[in-house]
Amino acid sequence: MTKQLPKTDTSAVNVADYIVERLAAEGIDHCFGVAGDYVFPICDAVDSSAKVKWIGCSNELNASYAADGYARIRGAAMLATTYGVGELSAINGVMGAKAERSLVFHVVGMPSYQHQRLHKIAHHTLGDGVFGNFVELSAGAACCHAVINPENCVVEMERIIAEARRNHQPAYIAVPSDYALSPVVSADVKPIVPGSNEAALKKAMAIIAERINKAKSIVAFPAFTISRLGLQKEAQKAIEALGCPFVTTLMEKCVIGESHPQFAGMYAGAVSEPKTRQIIEGADLVLDLGGVNLNDITTAAYSGQLDLSRFVTVGLDDVRIGDQVIANVRLEDILSELAKLKPSSAPYKGKPQGLAQVNGRPSDKITMAALYPRYAAFLRAGDTVVLETGSSSLGVTPTILPDGVRVEAQVLWGSIGWATPAAFGVALADPSRRTILITGEGSHQLTANDVGAMGRFGANVIVFVLNNSGYLIERALEENPDWTYNDLAPWSYAELPKALGCANWYTARVTTLGELDEAMKAARASQTGAYIEIIGGKMDMPPALAFAHGQLKAMYGDTP
Ligand SMILES: Cc1ncc(C[n+]2csc(CCOP(=O)(O)OP(=O)(O)O)c2C)c(N)n1
Ligand SMILES: [Mg+2]
């Protein structure tokens, strides 16, 4: 697709309008943020744009999480915050997007060039007349940055967009408020589209093909970056052409349908099914497609035995085989080359696992053993599930889910509160799918105010809040579960949507399985958003969390 750059040949186009139009050309039609005087020109440009809609959030942290959720679905998102106070509040969310490779363009309005030049003492500064104090902080949460002026605007926007696309990570764009309103100086540029160097691609494929031919057993290991880049179909085609089994970690939950005959299960070190573990740990060749992240969570406290010398790692922009690195090779190009291969034998055929049996009687209290199979039965093709860090994600990820369900979670960065605004961003990014938020109540307390934004902007999310009287995951990760810092203010969660302006949402507070089943039915039928508070046991945890409870030394290291 050729991108249409905004016109710059009339003096009517100012820097702010240009930036908004240029980001719109990247497929962005919503801008998350919080207004402020230094960023007014950007806000005005969004509000008067026919292409990009302003989505005001309760605070900048929420806005950054929402932008991350949006970017995961649409490939890129726009976030606008004001100087200092706004951008610093957004940093955790933008840094999370960097860690998890989600492309957020963070546009920040700075004090005017004139005031910067005069070293004025201005609000939102340290009172020192210095205006560069925060650029480096915000830039640290991005893979590239630019401070824009009318002369560099057109060229810098192309550089920034290309670099952010190459790394698939956030970009930071700072714009002094007077420059934002100045006419842009035109420049003769073309969009830079990341692509492979042909010779490098050939070389990489020759080495990969040789490794494939020599290997007695191959397994594909698609990475979370496959979904960030929207390459799910391409990865599936490549894996089908290879004919080998594929395994995922919980960061890639449902990246390819779990009923696919080549799916060999979820790998999580020692808590994997023995067959899954044997397939990946015993393989001669592990084709890592996208750069899997083998962290403490995905490996269940480093409990597996993966031999990295058997890995071929296809990164976003390079291929690594042992000590050899072939640069300038794009993941999408390797996938399409792999898709041309002809398997030498019949494809692997695993035994697809069915959905877990729904259990328990209607009058029973809600246990975790009964809750997670119910989620699997509730979810259907066309749903996007946003999972919060906490016991819920450790309960949902090992549960087989129906094909066509998409799952988004922030496994590596793991900042609680992420999932509520992220679900909002996901819902706005693709209203043709139903967005389901599954969160614990402790995490929800950090960012629940943007349930109000869901109502305001018609994002019809179905929200499940597990209320288990505190931070269960933390109780499980400590010797003593009863520290008071794991307790919470006992909110009336099911009353939040009404208080936050979601007047006609379906809401329920459920304590028995019968009530839960009814509420799930009503939520599914609801034409608006729905919000279900589920009362769970204070120490009732899914098996994966119970396992972690027994592995504290491996998780955190021994006591000194
Ligand atoms: C921003 C941030 N602060 C603190 C933590 C530490 N933390 C991880 S999980 C968690 C508690 C989650 O509790 P809840 O959402 O109620 O889920 P539960 O495990 O109880 O189901 C906390 C405080 C974190 N990951 N991120
Ligand atoms: Mg909790």
Image: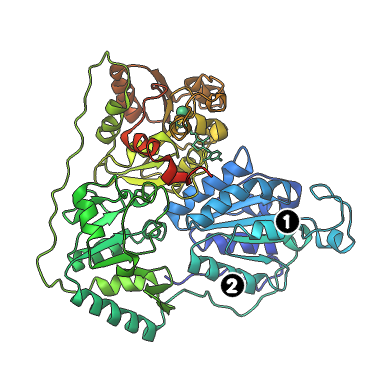
- Under mark 2, the amino acid is Arg
**2 or 1: tag closer to the N-terminus:** 1
Q: Is mark 1 within 8 Å of ligand 1?
A: no
Compute the Cα span from label 2 to label 1.
Answer: 21 Å
Looking at the image, residue 184 sits to the left or right of residue 330; the answer is: right
User: What residue occupies the far left of the structure in this picture?
Assistant: 346
The location of residue 388, given as percent across then percent down, is: 44, 39
Q: Which mark is residue 134?
A: 1
Point out the image quarter for the C terminus: top right
Q: Is residue 304 above or below residue 514?
A: below
Q: Is residue 465 above or below residue 102?
A: above
- Under mark 1, the amino acid is Phe
Looking at the image, residue 557 sits to the left or right of residue 115; the answer is: left
Residue bearing the label numbered 2: 159
User: What residue occupies the far front of the structure in this picture?
Assistant: 560
Give the image quarter of residue 6: bottom right
The residue lying toward the viewer, choosing from 505 and 480, is 480
